[in-house]
Every structure is written in structure tokens, then in C-alpha cells.
Image (cartoon, helix red, strand yellow):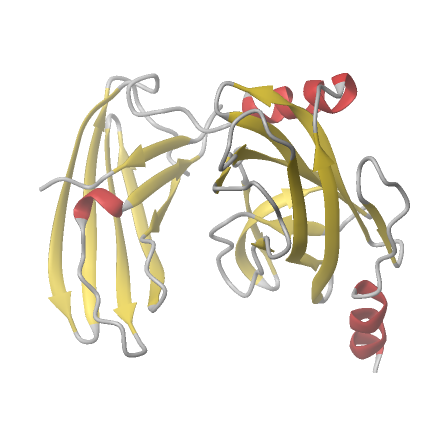
């Protein structure tokens, strides 16, 4: 009964501002759409999720039973594409299992590419995300914002979030990445061997991602010894869409140490 009441209340966010869409959601979460600033490709906005003490929300690959932020942009105008710039997440190990995400708050920068440069941009739609403490709850809220000019307060917050993105392979001193892919029942097993210039923390955790609508990724193990790291995951196909495993679409994110490392592609 408590879960049902919370779910109802969390879905009933009410907008409080016309300039930066805001929701106070049952004193558990608050969502702001930050107006941001113009970029060479269009405009940078952000979704700002603030959480009650002790609550967390999730990364794009949440692990366990987490619910990542999912956006529906229906109703937007002059929007050709959007791109998400995820800050480095944390790995949580608690009684609910292993999950990946953020405590206290998340500022998620979102790049907007317009259909026609120089013309007004309006974003409108709905976002669903999960919040979790002793229980995990899906939150749904609508947003609407006319995008124009520079909002200095949100510009600073967005640039700070962009500075917290994982390092690239080059900047992190990754020397080589080599992947073995073997067939298993209903899918493939990916084993990545990564060599770096300096030793990685012993507790480094690796997340393997593959963008396919009908693929479930089972993260397996990460072994780190000096400058060598080996990580594996199982990719299971379900549904009616065939899985063609394109190595260039695989993303490996190493979580641990001072800064996460994001590796794009998994060559043989």
C-alpha cells in the first residue's frame, strides 16, 4: 500500500516555473530542466534531478533493478537530435544488489541539434526515471521549455557536469583494447583485455554496453593486475530482432579510481 501511494504521488509533479520547468515530487525528488546556453551545434540544456537525503537515481546502465532516465521528446519543435553527456556515476553495493548511479543529485547535460539553425527551439515531452532508498520507485514528469539565449546560473552547473564526464582512452593512458567474442546460448560472451600505462585500482568495475533494443547485458567479472585489466559480460538476445554484434558499437566504462574511463569500440 505504501508503495502504491508513493507511486501515485511521484507521478503527480506540478510545474512551478515557466523558464526552467520544475517539479517537487512528494518531497523525494525534484526535476528542473535547465535552460543552458547556445553551442556551435545548437543548444545545451540539462535535466537536474535533486533527491531527498539517502535517495539515489540511476545512470544510463543502472545495473540490478534500476530505472535509467528515459526521455520522450514528443511535442518538441525544431529538434533534429539530442545527445546525452553523462557525468561519472558511482557503484552502489547494498541490500538491493549492485547498482550504478548518483546520490543527492544528477545534472545531465543534453545537447540539442536543431533542424534549422537560427530558428527557435522548443523542447517538450516526458521523462521517466527511478529513485531508490529502501524501495525503488518509477517517477514520471512532463516538461516544456522554449530554448533561447544564455542562462548564466545553469550554464555554470552544466559546464561543471561536463567536466565530470569519464576520461577518454587517450587521456586515461589506455595503450590497447582487445576483445574476444564467443557464442553462448541465446547470445555472445564478450571478454575485453585492456592495457594501460599506469596501474588501475584493484576494485575497478567494468560496465559493458551494447545499444540494441532486444539485448540484455549480464555484467560478469573484472580482474585487475597492475596495468592489465580483464572484464567480461554476457549479451543475451530476446524478442524478434536479430542481434548482429557490431564491435564498434560496444562501450566499456571502467569505474574506479579518481575518474572513470570510457572506451568506445571493442576491436579483435
Q: Is residue 258 above or below residue 141?
A: above
- Quadrant including the N terminus: bottom right
Residue drawn at x 34%, y 54% is 211
Q: Residue at x 61, y 45 (%)?
A: 77
Number of callouts in the render? 0
Q: Nearer the viewer, residue 159 or 43?
A: 43
The quarter of the picture where the C terminus appears is top left
Residue 164 visible in the current orientation: no
- Residue 71 in the image: above or below residue 176: below
Closer to the camera in the image, 17 or 80: 80
Above or below, comparing residue 143 to residue 262 in the picture: below
Give coordinates of residue 203: x percent, y percent. Answer: 41, 38
Residue 89, position in %: x, y?
54, 39
Q: 156 or 28, which lies in front? A: 156
Relative image position of residue 62 (x, y in whole percent)? 51, 54
- Residue, far bottom: 1
Q: Of 176 and 128, which appears nearest the observer?
A: 128
Horizontally, residue 32 falls left or right of residue 180, namely right
Picture coordinates of residue 84 (x, y %)?
51, 39
Point 69% across, 20% down: residue: 155
Residue 21 lies left or right of residue 241; in this view the side is right
Q: Is residue 183 left or right of residue 104?
A: left
Image quadrant assignment for residue 68: bottom right
Instruction: Give the residue at x 18% y 75%.
Output: 185
Asked whether residue 147 appears in the rendered view, the answer is yes
Among the 4 quarters of the image, the one containing residue 127:
bottom right
Amino acid at each position: 500500500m505504501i508503495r502504491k501511494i508513493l507511486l501515485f504521488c511521484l507521478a503527480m509533479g506540478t510545474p512551478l516555473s515557466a523558464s526552467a520547468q520544475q517539479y517537487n515530487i512528494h518531497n523525494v525528488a525534484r526535476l528542473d530542466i535547465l535552460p543552458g546556453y547556445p553551442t556551435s551545434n545548437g543548444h545545451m540544456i540539462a535535466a537536474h534531478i535533486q533527491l531527498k537525503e539517502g535517495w539515489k537515481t540511476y545512470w544510463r546502465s543502472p545495473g540490478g533493478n534500476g530505472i535509467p532516465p528515459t526521455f520522450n521528446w514528443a511535442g518538441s519543435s525544431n529538434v533534429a537530435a539530442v545527445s546525452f553527456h553523462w557525468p561519472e556515476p558511482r557503484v552502489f553495493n547494498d541490500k538491493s544488489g549492485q547498482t550504478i548511479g548518483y546520490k543527492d543529485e544528477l545534472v545531465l547535460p543534453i545537447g540539442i541539434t536543431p533542424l534549422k539553425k537560427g530558428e527557435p527551439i522548443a523542447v517538450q515531452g516526458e521523462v521517466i526515471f527511478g529513485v531508490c532508498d529502501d524501495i525503488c520507485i518509477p517517477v514520471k514528469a512532463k516538461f516544456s521549455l522554449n530554448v533561447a539565449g544564455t542562462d548564466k546560473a545553469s550554464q555554470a552547473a552544466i559546464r561543471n557536469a561536463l567536466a565530470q564526464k569519464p576520461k577518454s582512452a587517450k587521456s586515461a593512458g589506455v595503450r590497447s583494447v582487445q576483445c574476444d567474442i564467443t557464442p553462448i546460448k541465446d547470445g555472445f560472451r564478450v571478454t575485453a583485455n585492456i592495457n594501460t600505462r599506469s596501474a588501475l585500482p584493484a576494485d575497478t568495475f567494468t560496465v559493458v554496453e551494447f545499444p540494441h533494443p532486444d539485448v540484455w547485458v549480464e555484467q560478469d567479472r573484472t580482474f585487475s593486475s597492475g596495468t592489465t585489466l580483464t572484464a567480461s559480460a554476457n549479451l543475451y538476445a530476446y524478442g524478434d530482432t536479430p542481434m548482429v554484434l557490431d564491435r564498434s558499437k560496444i562501450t566499456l566504462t571502467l569505474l574506479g579510481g579518481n575518474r572513470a574511463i570510457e572506451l568506445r569500440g571493442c576491436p579483435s
